[in-house]
Image (tube, helix red, strand yellow):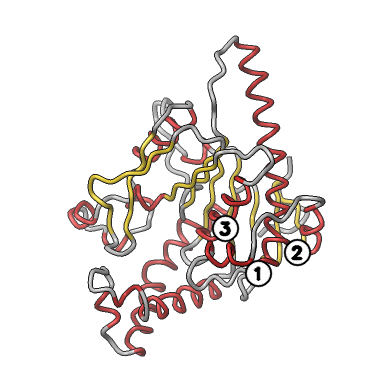
Amino acid sequence: MPSHKQSPFLNFTRDQWSSFRADTPLTLTEEEVERLRSLNDPIALQEVTSIYLSLSRLLASHVEATQALFSQRAEFLNLSDTKTPFIIGIAGSVAVGKSTTARILRELLTRWPASPKVDLVTTDGFLFSNETLRKQDLMNRKGFPESFDRRRVLDFLSRIKAGERNVTAPVYSHLVYDIVPNECVTVDQPDILIFEGINVLQVSDLPNDGDSVPFVSDYFDFSIYIDADAKIIERWYIDRFMRLRETAFRNPESFFHRYSQVSEDSARSIAQGLWSNINMVNLRDNILPTRQRADLVLHKDASHAVDQVLLRRL
């Protein structure tokens, strides 16, 4: 990150950030946190108390301000009172804990006093099918920007932001490692939408005609980047792979079932290769460069605990 004087972010230690919780109530139990966390992400209730309650309070202020601004603009333009969801984007590397963060935030936000409707959608469903990726020789680039149906992502978010009802998103199966044919989830005018994926802050070439919206993040009201040192993420990735080898990969229907049949040393070597040749390349070339575009960065230490919070200056 840039030096303090150059950075567009305010930098807070864990203790400083925790103090911003104020009187925000803790509405999750240890059992619920256990249910919400992802494999190999040892988040505990203390992490929710120290980090996520302050974040929930900050988001509450942003949602309130955005809703007030929308009402003022609608009155100024004499528009009908169309409901416009507040969209939160969550980005970061594979294995860094995005899914856990997204699920915990969703639970905390739905338990605000106003009981808002909060939906969560991941970008996995917007990957091209394996059949399409194979035809385009992109299977080894799965998760890279070019492996996603960006037009479909933009269409989905534009419909959500326009306040349309019953907007559908495709469904992805991690078991078969592919899009589920003829299956979708429906998002029906939520108060808040959390949109989570490795490259939701990704930029692209500007259109020559200047007519189209070039960035997915143009639809976000607030964005979060989950960060950690690359060597630490590598260890998390390999550890998770080895745990999956003993669990989900043992299912004969799993796309990765073959990895449960090899020796532990071979499996570790495979995981190392997948990280070095695919995921690390994607992190270095596409994901990490988007960190500076986030409104807030949660930096984790080797234990998965957030040790530093960077908040973009207004």
Proximity of marks 1 and 3: CB atoms separated by less than 8 Å: no
Q: Which residue is mark 1?
A: 305
Q: Nearer the viewer, residue 279 or 113?
A: 113
- Evaluate if marks 2 and 3 touch, with contact meaning CB atoms under 8 Å apart: no
Kind of residue at badge 2: Arg
Residue 187, image x, y percentages: 43, 38
Secondary element type, mark 3? helix
Which mark is on residue 14? 2
In whole angstroms, how far apart are the C-alphas of marks 2 and 3? 16 Å
Classify 122 as above or below 251: above
- The quarter in which the N terminus is drawn is bottom right
What is the spatial separation of the Cα atoms under label 1 and label 2, in whole angstroms? 9 Å
* Residue 96 place in picture, x, y as percent: 53, 65
233 and 106: which one is in front?
106
- The residue that mark 3 highlights is 101
Residue at the image position 57 percent from the left and 49 percent from the top: 106
Left or right: 305, with 99 as reference point: right
Q: Quadrant of residue 165?
A: top left
Q: Are marks 1 and 2 in contact (CB under 8 Å)?
A: yes
